[in-house]
Image: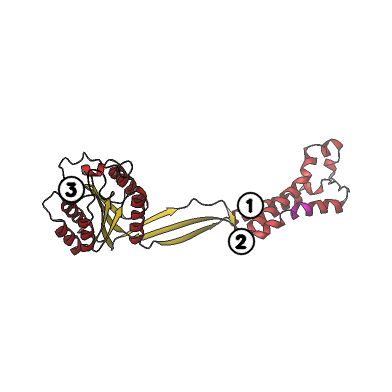
Amino acid sequence: MNWYSLTWFSYPTLREFEWAQRYFLYLLPVVPLVFALRRLLAGRGRQRLPVAFMTRDVRSGWIESLRHLPALLTGAGMVLVLVALARPQRVSQRIERSSEGIDIVLAIDISDSMLEADLQPNRLEAAKRVARAFVRGRFQDRIGLVVFAGDAFSLCPLTTDYELLTQSIGEVNSGLIRTAGTAIGSALGVSTNRLRESKAKSKIIVMLSDGENTAGSLDPVTAAELAESYGIRLYTIAVGREGSGETTTDEGTLRQLATVANGQFFRATDTRALSAVFTRIDRLEKVEIKQSKYREITDFYPVYLRWALVLLLLALLAKSTFLGNVLED
């Protein structure tokens, strides 16, 4: 079996805090309250300075301003300790999605009869618009494109490059094949040839046409039997209103081919009905998408803890020097 997978890596979130420990952050306002209470209890008493610093000029100079340094260092250290206890961390999330791919060939009739305007703006443009929406709704399925009129050829091989495929569908027009007629058998043959060596879990052909087989050397029923022998299901869609305009929509052949190849037949008489048909096919051929989530957590508390220790050691060093003797208000 072919497995296709797609992985998204989310951007790391902002630093978070471990949910059971983030309540330590609620203690942060307590730090300034502790120092305010200490200042209040200490009163406005003065400590003695060494003799060398007893002059008024020195006390009112830069040495006097350093008397707050130990308290500031201690307060900053305590804040960092609380942050470290709250365990700041960066969380990276990785999501892996995988599914067994389906191989799909879209076979679109581009004969002159597809220019009838019973679907707006015409049958071909309506089919192209809905086909593009169908492609955008698939996940990791390989999709190819076959066009046919009096002859048939592959316009885009099986691919998961949906942008390329959407561009190819947009370039489809009735002038790509000059041979007149509708070679349904040939279109099935080319589509089956694209899928016959596929190892995908499911292989399907979605054919959009509005007429009976009028060209080509391969009998449509024989082509459908060949597709069925390779395990390929065929969904046929009769585009347009029966008996409208100069051409009619022959559903008998398309219905028979879908039955032979274990698929289903649909009629789309307007753009809304055509969209509904593709939505139904999309539901019928959906595969289970497996999704796995992985979380990678990087802790940052050691960084905050180290800085906390540095600041507390500096505060202790400052208290052990002459700054410890500076008068405090």
Q: In the rendered image, which residue does mark 2 sit on? A: 19
Comparing 252 with 135, the one in front is 252
Crowding at dot 1, Cα within 10 Å, few <14 / some 14-19 / many 20+, comes out as: some
Q: Nearer the viewer, mark 2 or mark 1?
A: 2
Between 195 and 68, which is closer to the camera in this rendering?
Answer: 195
Q: Which residue is mark 3?
A: 182
Residue at x-position 16% and y-position 56%: 220
Q: Residues within 10 Å of mark 3 (few under 14, many from 20)?
A: many
Query: How far is mark 2 from mark 3, CA to CA?
Result: 67 Å
Q: Which span is picked out in magenta?
A: 28-33
* Residue closer to the observer: 178 or 113: 113
What numbered label is drawn on residue 320?
Answer: none
Q: Is residue 133 left or right of residue 42?
A: left
Looking at the rendering, in which quadrant would you find the N terminus? Answer: bottom left
Place residue 257 in its image quadrant.
bottom left
Measured as percent of width and height from the top left, residue 32 is found at: 76, 51
Please tell me whether residue 144 belongs to the stretch shown in magenta.
no
Which residue is pictured at 57% across the width and 52% down the height? 15
What amino acid is found at the position of numbered circle 2 in the picture?
Trp
Q: CA distance from mark 1 to mark 3?
A: 79 Å
Q: Which mark is residue 307?
A: 1
- Main secondary structure type of the part rendered in magenta: helix
Horizontal and vertical percent position of residue 252: 21, 57
Q: Is residue 157 visible?
A: no
- Image spot of residue 218 (x, y percent): 12, 54
The one nearer the camera, 284 or 72, is 284
**Percent position of residue 145, x then y:** 25, 49
Q: Quadrant of residue 2?
A: bottom left
Question: Residue at left 49%, top 50%?
Answer: 11
